[in-house]
Amino acid sequence: MKTAHPYLYFNGNTEEAFLFYQSVFDTKLIELLRFGDIEENPMNVSDSDRDKIAHIALPLGNVILMGTDVIDSMDQSLTIGNNFYITLEPESAEEAEAVFHSLSEGGTVQIPLKKEFWAEKYGMCTDKYGVQWMVSYEGEMGS
């Protein structure tokens, strides 16, 4: 496994929270992507949600704290307890497949492992213990 990172979900205040974390930990944001920055709107985000955060990242030592806003127009809702994932970055497509299959066995798949515009292999699942996981192998998409 290349690395693992916490991924937090917020109810429209991701940017505010991450600016707070930036000041607390005396570090700088390394990524900030709004839904409106994504060309062709592949997720069909409503105009009212386009200014919300699609992805944000803040380094904390060797870990990167990442986050996003929950989007009403995508039928998402936030409940404390479902507001985080552990994001895994496998070293290969084969490792992504194996880890995702193992984690999702006996659990629930939210997004099947598949190609996305940012990754060769990306999927989301909740394991049989209720822990939420994202598996994201960039491969050639990250080059």
Image (cartoon, rainbow, N blue to C red):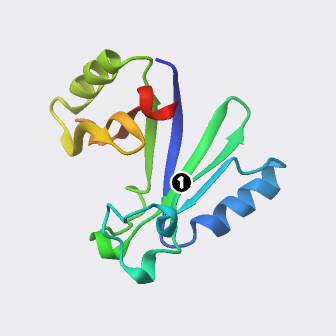
Q: Is residue 61 left or right of residue 54?
A: right
* Location of residue 73 with respect to 118 vertically, above or below: below
Seen from the viewer's position, the closer of residues 54 and 140 is 140
Q: Position of residue 54 (x, y in %)?
A: 48, 60
Q: Nearer the viewer, residue 72 or 93?
A: 93
Residue shown at the point (44%, 34%) measured from the top left: 141
Figure check: 37 above or below 127: below
Residue 23 placement (x, y as % from top left):
81, 57
At which x and y percent is residue 65? Answer: 61, 44
Under tag 1, what secondary structure? strand
- The residue type indicated by label 1 comes to Gly
Residue appearing at x 39%, y 37% in the figure: 119
- Quarter location, residue 45: bottom left
Q: Is residue 138 visible?
A: no
Which residue bears the numbered disc 1?
A: 67
> Is 76 displayed left or right of 63 in the figure?
left
Q: Residue 117 location, x and y as percent? A: 37, 45
